[in-house]
Image (cartoon, rainbow, N blue to C red):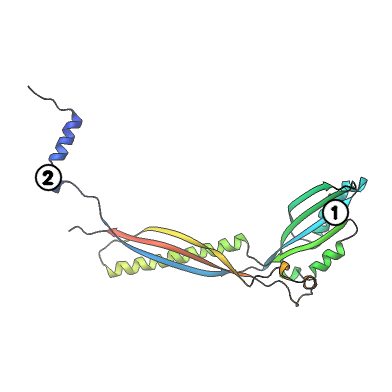
Amino acid sequence: MMRVLSPLAFCLTLALTLPASAQVPPPVMDQVVLDLTAEDWVGTETARVTVSADAAASGADAGTQRSDLLKAIGGLTPGADWKIVSFDRSTDQAGLERWRAVAEARLAENALGGLADKAKQASRPGLQLRIGSIEFTPTLGETEAVRARLRAEIYGKAASELDALERSFPGRKFRMGNIDFADQPPMAYARKTREDMQPMAMAAAPGQDGPVNVSEKLVVRARVVLSALAPRE
C-alpha cells in the first residue's frame, strides 16, 4: 500500500533529515556595554514671581471688580506677562462679592527691587495685593536646552568609544547597537524663596537680603551597547 505525504509533512521530514552542518545557527553578537555620564549646571536670569490679590465689593462696584483686580496685578511691573493660575469668586455673609486671584510671571532680577512696596502701594480698601513667592528656578525651556546639550555630549563620547574599539580590534565592524538614557532629576542648590524670609526682608531694597540665584545640577546617564558579529569558528 502506497502512502502519500502532504507537502507540509514532506518539508518537515526533509528538515529533520538534513545534516547538522546544513542548519544555519542564529548569529552571535559580541557586545561592549558602557555606562556614560554627562553633567552641567542649569542657570536662569529670571525669577518666578507669584502675587495674590483679594478684592471685595458690593452693588454696582462688583461689575468692575474683576477688571480692577487684574489691572492692579499688571501695574506692579508694566510689560510683564502675568498669568492667572487661580481665580475664585464667592459671596460672604454680609452679601459682599469677594474675588481672589493668584498670578505668576517670570521677572528679571532688576525688576524685583521694591516689589513688596509696590504691592502695598497698589493696595487700597477693598483690594489687597501681596507678593507670594520669588524663586530663581530655571524654566523648563532652560532645563531642556541643557539636557539636549548633555545628550549630544553622550553621543560624542559613545562615538569616541566606538572609534577606539575599532582601532583596538582591526577588521571588526562594531556599531552602536543601543543607547538607553536615564535622566536624573535636577538638583537645586542655594535655593532661597520669599517664604524663607522675615516680613521685613520682603520689603528690602536691592542689595539687602533677598532671593538668591538658583542653579540646578543636571546629570544625564546613558547605557551604550556597542556590538559586532562574532567571528565564526
Category of crowding for the residue at label 2, using alpha-carbon neighbours closer than 10 angstroms: few (below 14), some (14–19), many (at least 20): few
* Residue plotted at (12% across, 45% down): 19
Asked if one can make out residue 64 in the rendered structure from this viewpoint, the answer is yes
Given residues 124 and 164, the one toward you in this image is: 124
Q: Which residue is mark 1?
A: 55
Instruction: Name the disc covering residue 92, or none.
Output: none
The residue beneath circle 2 is: 19
Q: Residue at x 52, y 62 (%)?
A: 148
Q: Is residue 156 left or right of residue 17?
A: right
Instruction: Examine the rendering and report whether any part of residue 81 can be seen.
Output: no
Residue sitting farthest toward the bottom: 207
Q: Residue at x 60, y 60 (%)?
A: 141
Q: Quadrant of the N terminus?
A: top left
Specify whether 72 is left or right of 165. right
In the picture, which quadrant includes the C terminus? Answer: bottom left
* Residue sitting nearer the eye, 195 or 233: 195
- Residue 60 quadrant: top right
Badge nearest the viewer, 2 or 1: 1
Location of residue 156 in the rendering, given as x and y in whole percent from the top left corner: 43, 66
* Residue type marked 2: Pro
Q: Secondary structure at mark 2?
A: loop
Q: Quadrant of residue 207?
A: bottom right
Where does residue 179 sit, x and y in percent of width and height? 41, 59
Residue 10 rendering spot, x and y as whole percentages:
16, 32
Left or right: residue 132 compared with residue 65: left
Badge 1 amino acid: Ala
